[in-house]
Amino acid sequence: MRDKIIESILNNKEEFISGEELSKKLGISRAGVWKHIKILKQQGYNIESVNKRGYRLSEKPDDLLTYKNICHELDNEFVGSKIVHFDTIESTNDYAKTIANESQEGTIIISEEQTKGKGRLGRQWHSKASEGIWMSMILKPEIMPYKAPFITLIAGASIVSALNKLGVNTSIKWPNDIIINNKKVAGILTELSAEIERINYIVLGIGINVKIMEFPQEILDIATSLYKEEYKISRVDIVRSIISEFEKLYLDYIKNDSKEKTLEICRKHSVLIGKKIYVLQGDNKELVKCLDINDKGNLIVEDQNRSKREIMSGEVSIRGVKGYV
Amino acid sequence: MRDKIIESILNNKEEFISGEELSKKLGISRAGVWKHIKILKQQGYNIESVNKRGYRLSEKPDDLLTYKNICHELDNEFVGSKIVHFDTIESTNDYAKTIANESQEGTIIISEEQTKGKGRLGRQWHSKASEGIWMSMILKPEIMPYKAPFITLIAGASIVSALNKLGVNTSIKWPNDIIINNKKVAGILTELSAEIERINYIVLGIGINVKIMEFPQEILDIATSLYKEEYKISRVDIVRSIISEFEKLYLDYIKNDSKEKTLEICRKHSVLIGKKIYVLQGDNKELVKCLDINDKGNLIVEDQNRSKREIMSGEVSIRGVKGYV
């Protein structure tokens, strides 16, 4: 019933809907409507109630990343077909992995807070309550496992494309960091479960710093958030935009084997192409020039002997490179 | 304490060890020794007790694939460093995946029976109690995920090499079936959990039909067992031999990036090289000639237009090919 009430209010957009109308529409008493509204408010919906006019959402309910809020009138085929929303969880990626085998493709896990958020290589990811978007998507593409890494690039292209459409100027540090003003605002953690010739599932984790204003000392110089960069955008709008962009690029890749659009976005918004960068492998650190991202999605670099080679992944760093702006 | 008793008996090989000696050695009463022996017998150890002479194992305790039996005096660095033994379990691969993150590399799960044994692509694998070897190995190689498929070839080479040393003439149907007399006697199911540039873990499942004499009608023509082919070998000896062969070839690959020995075994014992085979992909079935296994471990085939190409995996079939012996 509360689902129906919030849907009616959402459908009414910025107009008021009267208690009487809701009561008729849903076949419950006005007192019943009021009770449900009270609970919705407790759940975080910012519902205005004005005497004789009725109810409306006084602002976009961007503090609650629920299925209703995210998928309302969204035209997606399968990404977001189910959204599991938590107030708090250890890690959305870890949770997604426990339900992945039984879940349908496109299921999304979102938590307001992660207590053990993970970055790449098991690193910690700070995921404060309601201050970011901490989500994981379950994918089951019928492709060979060696084609899975490209999905990280699709995710990066989707985030950049979504944020740019919302007026935020972002770039991609290949393969999985999203950058504003030389600082990381979002990251992608792709995890794969596979047999040799078949993918069981992919869990695609996305973390976006939205409202965080204060970062721990050790990442102060390298991390930022949308709010800190003066972009005050609703979390719901961001998620809606990302999953809509993602589905298009993902289907292009899976159904049509087309990488073109993703590569175009990754190249256009790359912070690495044309720069001198370090390639870090184990304890080695080598200064190279980044030339391009090739059709496979790998980085093409030129070393100091002018010989070119392909970097499949591993760390690349732009910190401390002389002449780097 | 029972571990110590069985170790003393194993150390004594085919000689008797007296109750008195055991009692002194372990600092417990002779009645205590006797109690433990009774329980060991219930667990499946075939311990002879002869008045005035003492105890000995009357035959190789090959019906119990425990750590003690398998690893006694085995000279392995890490494969088999821990063995978890079950009487029955749904699937050793599935169980291994649940403990893999917290387990040390080389941990082995063995079950006398699997109630939901899995083959490739989610197919069923018949795993009757005590009639085969149903085991899974947890590996954590520090290599890039795209290098993981080669580990299936290492496993295949280890099984063939181990069985051949025990006098069984077997071949490999690339990439993951072991064949005797044109029938499948063993299979490998490699499952991978990975980030884009790092392997979390690999679960290497090995299923070997040892004593099965009767197969279901639908696989009667394509499956066999060692006993059915008149090879009566102890299961413990097989496991010991496989994990010893495997560790050598695996370390060669992981530490020295050397595939030579594995490829040599895979080529020498291949049932595909030189044959006409079907390559099945989706609904397509194409007759090609198999030329070789290349250095990457992939199959090189020549199609009917004489153009050569590399098969990374997918189904290959030799059934129904005209002229196939």
Image (cartoon, coloured by chain):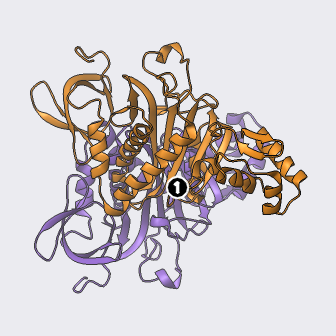
Chain colours: A purple, B orange
Write down the quadrant of residue B82 in the picture. bottom right
The C terminus of chain A appears in which quarter of the rendering? Answer: bottom left
Q: Residues within 10 Å of mark 1 (few under 14, many from 20)?
A: many
Residue A94 vertical placement versus A214 (above, below): above
Residue A248 located left or right of residue A112? left
Residue A238 located left or right of residue B149? right
Residue B295 located left or right of residue A97? left
Q: Nearer the viewer, residue A317 or B2?
A: B2
Residue position marked by numbered label 1 in the rendering: B106
Q: Report whether residue A118 is seen.
A: yes
- Amino acid type assigned to the residue bearing label 1 in the image: Gly
Question: How far across and down, in percent of the image, does residue B59 sit?
Answer: 65, 38
Question: How far across and down, in percent of the image, does residue A181 sit?
Answer: 34, 77
Residue A273 vertical placement versus B204 (above, below): below
Residue A171 vertical placement versus B113 (above, below): below
Write down the quadrant of residue A191 in the picture. bottom left
The N terminus of chain A appears in which quarter of the rendering? Answer: top right
Q: Nearer the viewer, residue B131 or A40?
A: B131
Residue B317 located left or right of residue A101? left
Q: Report whether residue A81 is seen.
A: no
Image mark 1: chain: B
Secondary element under disc 1, as helix, strand or loop, is: loop
Q: Residue at x 60, y 49 (%)?
A: B98
Question: How far across and down, in percent of the image, does residue A55 sit?
Answer: 66, 51
Q: Residue at x 24, y 82 (%)?
A: A324
Q: Residue at x 21, y 85 (%)?
A: A323
Residue B160 vertical placement versus A285 (above, below): above
Q: Nearer the viewer, residue A242 or B123?
A: B123
Question: How far across and down, in percent of the image, does residue A259 sit?
Answer: 25, 47
